[in-house]
Image (cartoon, rainbow, N blue to C red):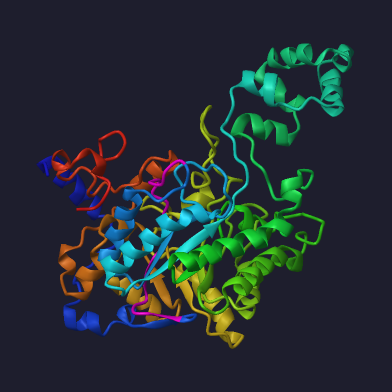
């Protein structure tokens, strides 16, 4: 490493949560973080947890690739108590280089993935897979494509144009001529002519909502999703996973049903019971398919962190309902919503971690109030609600976990049952093993600058600035990113 790079790294480490003394091996052996805990029908050897991270290494058809196997094998070598495979689509639809589980043809690759993790961890890591559904999302169009192709021309739009432009002929213009007339407008006139939804489609790209019940596929989600999740969970069982994590968080379909912004009037929104109905039906369908053989948990939001969105009281209510229905764990996150995300550039898709709620989901050292353990209070509130109700459902916390003493204190205070670390585990997949063996001073520490998140935003292979240039010239092409500029696995 160059002296300049070393100096820059030292400055960044000055902002990282300090660890004045790492535990020796004897101390680590007595730490609660490295002690066992029941997780539904399984027993985790430790309360250490690596949550789902999307590395963008699958094939464009959603298949497991050698790069996917290497990614998860590398984490398994560090022997975490629980490792969660990335958000994996339950529908068999194109979704870029993201894993899918919506068809039996994905089983051979997923079986190989399970075998790799079992071998690398010596069978000591529980392996879960996160199951996700998401709605249609389009890239932000050019004005020309929007007005000439995508915009739906109806009577309401023509009436607004005739009134705002004081041009009654807009009511009868041929559609092609009308579109050309709109395209010729000054952008400052768009707000007077377009509905809020049309304006958003133009400036942020088209995005389906669960409230778009005029669309048959969206209207029928309560009928189709329980079966899709159940079939995906059954494939996970047949592939050899220990369990599944239902993705009920962030900007995606199931979280949107849980959200206070869900105003569906068909019994699946617009009230506490309505918003909980589909998440409970999905859980019931999954449990009916896999029985008590698999761990079945969920990732959900302790706070949506957006205007009008759900808050911790809603998360407590949802967690209690799901736990009473048989959920094996609750993994708590925060924010990460489309509603307050930054508008994308033309030709790019909106990304739900670029606004204030996204910064709460993945806080950095630059965020006001600090990032270390920032979201632990949400998990603590949910755990307390569960325990007050007589439920022993484990709660997983995450967000800015950067030292073993920090994790231990969370467990000692009863704020969570498992403590997860994503970015620190990416910086050093061996950090848990090093800590247990008394070699914590060798841990490569995360800077919490979200270098990795910036790669994720553009669907580039996720790596870490702490290692993705190390010994790069010695690596064969298949171990480098598509552009050849970064190594794909930690040294």
Name the side, left or right, on which 261 lies relative to 406.
right
Question: Magenta region's main secondary structure?
Answer: loop
| Front residue of 225 and 304 | 225
Can you give x and y, in whole percent of width and height, for residue 73 in the image? Answer: 29, 60
| Front residue of 56 and 442 | 56
Name the residue at 37% across, 64% down. Answer: 114
Can you give x and y, in whole percent of width and height, for residue 334 in the image? Answer: 52, 60
Name the residue at 14% across, 44% down. Answer: 471
> Is 314 in the magenta?
no
Number of numbered labels in the structure image: 0
Quadrant location of residue 70? bottom left
Q: What is the residue that sits farthest to the bottom in this orientation?
A: 390
Name the residue at 43% across, 41% down. Answer: 459
* Res 296 seen here: yes
Quadrant location of residue 429? bottom left
Picture layout, residue 462 above or below residue 18: above
* Res 101 seen here: no
Can you give x and y, in whole percent of width and height, for residue 117 in the image? Answer: 32, 64
Can you give x and y, in whole percent of width and height, for residue 139 in the image? Answer: 56, 33
Name the side, left or right, on which 297 lies relative to 241.
right
Picture layout, residue 334 above or below residue 30: above
Assign the N terminus to one quadrant of the image. Answer: top left
Name the residue at 67% across, 69% down. Answer: 280
Quadrant location of residue 140? top right
| Front residue of 256 and 214 | 214
Which stretch did the figure color magenta?
A: 42-60
Name the side, left or right, on which 144 lies relative to 44.
right
| Front residue of 182 and 488 | 488
């Amino acid at each position: 490493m160059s002296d300049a790079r070393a100096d820059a790294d030292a400055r960044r480490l000055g902002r990282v949560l300090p660890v004045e003394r790492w535990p020796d091996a004897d101390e680590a052996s007595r730490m609660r973080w490295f002690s066992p805990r029941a997780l539904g029908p399984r027993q985790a050897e430790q309360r250490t947890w690596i949550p789902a991270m999307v590395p963008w290494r699958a094939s464009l058809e959603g298949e497991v690739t050698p790069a996917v196997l290497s990614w998860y094998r590398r984490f398994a070598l560090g022997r975490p108590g629980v490792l969660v495979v990335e958000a994996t689509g339950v529908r068999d639809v194109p979704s870029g280089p993201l894993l899918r589980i919506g068809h039996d043809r994905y089983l051979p690759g997923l079986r190989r993935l399970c075998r790799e993790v079992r071998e690398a961890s010596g069978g000591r890591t529980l392996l879960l897979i996160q199951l996700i559904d998401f709605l249609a999302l389009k890239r932000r169009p050019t004005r020309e494509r929007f007005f000439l192709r995508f915009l739906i021309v109806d009577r309401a739009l023509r009436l607004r144009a005739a009134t705002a432009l004081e041009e009654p002929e807009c009511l009868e213009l041929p559609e092609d001529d009308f579109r050309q007339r709109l395209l010729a407008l000054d952008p400052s006139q768009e707000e007077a002519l377009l509905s809020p939804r049309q304006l958003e489609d133009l400036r942020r790209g088209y995005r389906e909502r669960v409230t778009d019940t005029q669309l048959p596929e969206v209207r029928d989600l309560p009928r189709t999703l329980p079966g899709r999740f159940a079939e995906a969970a059954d494939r996970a069982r047949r592939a050899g996973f220990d369990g599944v994590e239902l993705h009920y968080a962030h900007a995606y379909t199931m979280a949107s049903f849980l959200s206070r912004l869900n105003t569906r009037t068909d019994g699946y929104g617009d009230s506490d019971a309505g918003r909980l109905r589909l998440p409970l039906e999905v859980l019931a369908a999954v449990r009916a398919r896999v029985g008590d053989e698999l761990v079945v948990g969920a990732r959900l939001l302790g706070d949506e962190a957006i205007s009008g969105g759900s808050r911790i009281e809603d998360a407590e209510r949802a967690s209690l309902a799901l736990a009473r229905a048989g959920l094996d764990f609750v993994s708590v996150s925060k924010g990460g919503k489309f509603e307050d995300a930054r508008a994308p550039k033309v030709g790019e898709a909106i990304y739900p971690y670029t606004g204030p709620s996204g910064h709460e989901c993945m806080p950095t050292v630059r965020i006001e109030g600090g990032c270390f353990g920032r979201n632990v209070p949400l998990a603590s509130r949910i755990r307390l609600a569960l325990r007050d109700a007589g439920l022993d459902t484990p709660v997983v916390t995450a967000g800015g976990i950067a030292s073993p003493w920090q994790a231990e204190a969370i467990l000692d205070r009863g704020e969570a049952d498992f403590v997860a670390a994503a970015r620190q585990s990416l910086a050093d997949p061996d950090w848990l093993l090093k800590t247990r063996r008394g070699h914590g001073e060798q841990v490569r520490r995360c800077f919490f600058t979200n270098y990795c998140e910036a790669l994720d935003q553009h669907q580039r292979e996720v790596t870490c600035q702490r290692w993705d240039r190390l010994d790069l010239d010695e690596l064969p092409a298949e171990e480098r990113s598509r552009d050849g500029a970064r190594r794909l696995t930690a040294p």
